[in-house]
Amino acid sequence: MITPAPPRRPCRRYGADGTPCSSTTTRADGWCGRCDGYTTARPAVTPDVSAPRRSEWRWGTGTWTPGTLGMDSDEAYEIDVTPGAVATYGRVHAVVPKVAETQIRSLLEDLISEQADTERSGTGTWRIYFRRHGYGLVISADRSHVLRYCTRHAERTWAQYRTGVTSRISGPGGLAAWKREAVARHLPLPVGGKVLNLYARHTLGLKVTRDTIDDIARRLAAHLGDNVLPHWSRTEEAAVEDGHGNTWVLLRTERFPDGIVATVYATGSEPVKPPSREK
């Protein structure tokens, strides 16, 4: 017997400008996949309003060592999801528990199928996460439960992020998702929103567009790899001159433990203020 398709129902998400979506959907998470997919009309935090962000990039104390989780993607729909993980997801992304559990399972499926980083703690629990993208889960030692949901993002879900929905919170200095993804293909570190445009405009004489982004990101990665990163001692904050008239500011924070290229300015000039160093 053929299982009937789920009934269509209104998409109850919002565009980045707060406009309610008018599409319909059959998806289990209630999103049509065509609008921006925000669960609230307005973000809880905005760039010009001081308030605590809801990001949950906390893994607990102790050391994590690389290991093989040994799960198939199908097991994402067999594992139990604890109320604590559901509650954290629901609080961060403003969704009801049923939707939170559905989206956690979808994230786990992608983490497994895309061979995300997997590590084990001293107590035996596992973490599987997209280091660059900022989404991950803690799994019990016996792989029977999702214990915790972790993200660096204050409101976007993994489903939104992977489809290129840009942040409403990071402000005009943040990189659009399509730019960020292009940079990630070539560079092991994220870059601040102004870095890409400043390098493209002042060094290459180019404008960043969807047609030029890959070439610009590739050339930026090569420049940093040859002239900047070898001279960075991985300190918490450093300003490195590249020998071509530019100074690059690099930071390491709790949010960016592997580092971020925060900004760049002409050597000897007043630097462009880097993004806030979130702890």
Image (cartoon, helix red, strand yellow):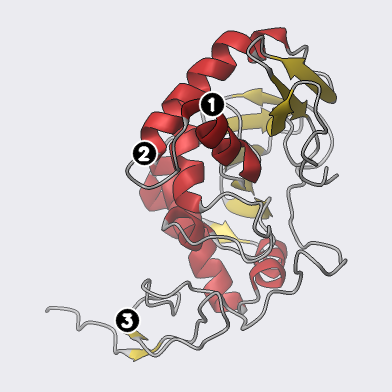
* Residue type, label 3: Thr
Residue farthest along the left direction in this orientation: 1
* Residue type, label 1: Thr
Q: Nearer the viewer, residue 100 or 131?
A: 131
- Looking at the picture, how far across and down is residue 226, in whole percent? 56, 9
What residue would you read off at disc 2? 212
- Quarter of the image with the N terminus in it: bottom left
- Looking at the picture, how far across and down is residue 121, in whole percent? 72, 31
N-term-proximal mark, 3 vs 2:
3
- Helix, strand or loop for disc 3: loop
- The residue under the point 79% across, 61% down is 53
- Helix, strand or loop for disc 2: loop
Q: Is residue 148 above or below residue 70?
A: below
Residue 185 in the figure: left or right of residue 60:
left
Check residue 203 in the rendering and tell me which mark sits there, or answer none. 1
User: Looking at the image, do the residues carrying marks 3 and 2 touch, with CB atoms under 8 Å apart?
Assistant: no
N-term-proximal mark, 3 vs 1:
3
What residue would you read off at disc 3? 26
